[in-house]
């Protein structure tokens, strides 16, 4: 899986700082599980954050004292070990045989989604919300949803109240921003207006987190919004 669409740098910085809302953080984690590119950017963001923290919070006297105490204890431990009698040496145990990688089941969900939707798509109990569109909402987090959209389905034109993160799990869709397939992340804000169209062949399954309700352009979609709660 080689994602072509990634998390925005500002989203990664917020994730590294622990500042993302929980639902958005769950979806970001699902993307990071499959995207080496974003994992490297996250490590860079964490390193930058640590350097800034060191510059803004110099070591306090208590921190220096704790460091000196740890050094003293380490020295005492070394002297104690040197005074102990030499023990009988034993040959090292034979190394355990390498474990072969476990092949992921095609229906397996990212680990970060397991607490909310279970480990496999086979266990998901979908709820119908519109022709060709089914969803499931996390029980304790209404802003975290998983969608299954039939192939060739054109969704209503909409924009976003604030932020939206959508990770594609299966299938694909395309819109004005490009083609989004398995592993791709749609990191959207209130400036984006789009109309996703799912690709033919297989349903598009994705997990989304919203900071605020969607803003639909058409009157019919707006009138149904209070029923589907998107």
Image (tube, rainbow, N blue to C red):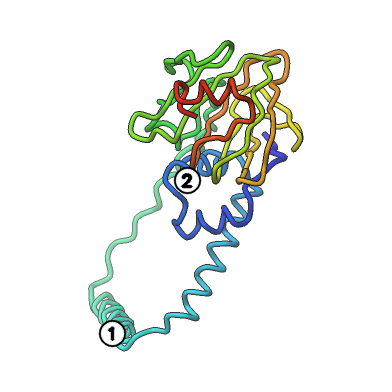
Residue sitting at x 52%, y 38%? 30
Please report the residue visible at 62 percent of the width from the left and 43 percent of the height from the top. Answer: 188
Q: Quadrant of residue 171?
A: top right
User: In the rendered view, would you say 86 is above or below 201?
Assistant: below
Q: Secondary structure at mark 2?
A: helix
Q: Position of residue 83 (x, y in %)?
A: 24, 79
The x, y position of residue 181, in whole percent, is 69, 29
Seen at 60% across and 62% down, the residue is: 44
Specify the label residue 25 is tagged with: 2
Location of residue 154 by image quarter: top right
Q: Residues within 10 Å of mark 1 (few under 14, many from 20)?
A: few
Circle 1 sits in a helix, a strand or a loop, which is it? Answer: helix
The residue nearer to you, when weighing 145 against 115, is 145
Residue count near mark 2 (Cα–Cα under 10 Å), binned few <14, some 14–19, many ≥20: many
81 with respect to 147 (left or right): left
Give the CA separation, mark 1 to mark 2: 34 Å
- Residue placed under numbered mark 1 in the picture: 62
Q: Are marks 1 and 2 in contact (CB under 8 Å)?
A: no
């Amino acid at each position: 899986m080689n994602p072509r669409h990634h998390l925005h740098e500002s989203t990664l910085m917020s994730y590294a700082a622990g500042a993302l809302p929980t639902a958005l953080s769950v979806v970001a984690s699902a993307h990071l599980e499959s995207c080496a590119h974003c994992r490297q950017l996250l490590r860079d963001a964490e390193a930058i954050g640590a350097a800034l923290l060191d510059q803004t919070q110099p070591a306090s006297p208590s921190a220096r004292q704790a460091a000196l105490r740890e050094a003293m204890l380490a020295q005492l431990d070394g002297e104690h070990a040197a005074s102990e009698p030499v023990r009988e040496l034993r040959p090292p145990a034979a190394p355990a045989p390498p474990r072969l990688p476990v092949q992921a089941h095609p229906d397996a969900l990212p680990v970060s989604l397991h607490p909310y939707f279970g480990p496999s798509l086979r266990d998901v109990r979908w709820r119908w919300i519109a022709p060709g569109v089914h969803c499931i909402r996390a029980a304790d987090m209404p802003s975290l949803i998983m969608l299954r959209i039939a192939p060739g389905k054109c969704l209503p034109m909409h924009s976003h109240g604030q932020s939206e993160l959508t990770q594609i799990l299966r299938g694909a869709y395309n819109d004005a921003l490009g083609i989004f397939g398995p592993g791709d992340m749609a990191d959207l804000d209130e400036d984006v207006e789009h109309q996703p169209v799912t690709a033919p062949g297989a349903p598009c399954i994705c997990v989304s987190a919203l900071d605020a309700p969607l803003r639909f352009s058409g009157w019919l979609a707006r009138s149904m919004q209070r029923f589907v709660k998107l």
